[in-house]
Image (cartoon, helix red, strand yellow):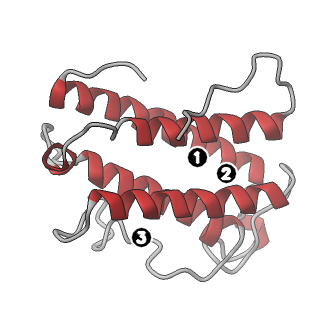
Amino acid sequence: MEPVSEPEMTLADPSALLAGYLDYCRDGVLRKFEGLSDREARHSRLPSGWTPLGLLKHLAYMERRWFRWGFAAEQVDQPWGDQPQNEGEWYVEPGETVAEVKAFFREQCAHSRAIAAKGSLDDRAAAGGRFATAEDAPTLAWILFHVLQEYARHLGHLDIARELADGITGE
């Protein structure tokens, strides 16, 4: 698959810019797994104990929480499935494979893309999913930007984890 490029520097449309950078970051996450062994994907080199695979699963559920359950107010199973005890610790089942988690991530990203493409930046999230009332609901612009900053932070984490795992740096 061809890598997703950073959006053009002349792009001024906020919707297209946010969508472009989100896809660029989503692709960046997947690129961090290219050539990473299954062992390293499941191994933590950090005191907190999180693993690259756990972070990937977290990002898939983060997409699900913000776009499907959040913005679209879909009733989804286990919106916090990356944190079964809802204690903030990411969890990967021993039998889950890297390929399965990647596929789930791609699926959630596709749902998010479709949901965002149907909305306007000033649309508020629907009530009844993650948000009980319309007054509690953020705009699509806020959600897109929030998700983008989450990717920026976690891509940095993956950069460090990958360098510690095998010395690979860069995109």
Q: CA distance from mark 3 to mark 2?
A: 17 Å
CA neighbours of label 1 inside 10 A, class few (<14), some (14 to 19), many (20+) = some
Location of residue 53 in the rendering, given as x and y in whole percent from the top left corner = 28, 52
Q: Mark 3 and 1 residues: CB-CB less than 8 Å, in contact?
A: no
Residue shown at 65%/78% (left/top)? 74
Of 59 and 39, nearer the camera is: 39
| Disc assigned to residue 147 | 1
Location of residue 140 in the rendering, given as x and y in whole percent from the top left corner = 76, 53
Q: CA distance from mark 3 to mark 1?
A: 16 Å
Residue type at numbered disc 1:
Val
Q: CA distance from mark 1 to mark 2?
A: 6 Å
Of 112 and 150, nearer the camera is: 112
Q: Secondary structure at mark 2?
A: helix
Q: Quadrant of residue 36?
A: top left
Of 60 and 75, nearer the camera is: 60
Name the quadrant of the C terminus.
top left
Q: Mark 3 and 2 residues: CB-CB less than 8 Å, in contact?
A: no
The answer to whether residue 42 is above or below residue 11 is below
CA neighbours of label 2 inside 10 A, class few (<14), some (14 to 19), many (20+) = many
Residue shown at 68%/75% (left/top)? 73
The answer to whether residue 54 is above or below residue 135 is above
Residue on which the image places disc 2: 143
Residue shown at 71%/26% (left/top)? 7
Residue shown at 68%/47% (left/top)? 144
Q: Mark 1 and 2 residues: CB-CB less than 8 Å, in contact?
A: yes
Residue on which the image places disc 3: 80
The answer to whether residue 165 is above or below residue 67 is above
Q: Earlier in the sequence, mark 3 or mark 1?
A: 3
Residue 90 seen anywhere in this rendered image of the structure = no
Residue type at numbered disc 3:
Trp
Q: Earlier in the sequence, mark 3 or mark 2?
A: 3
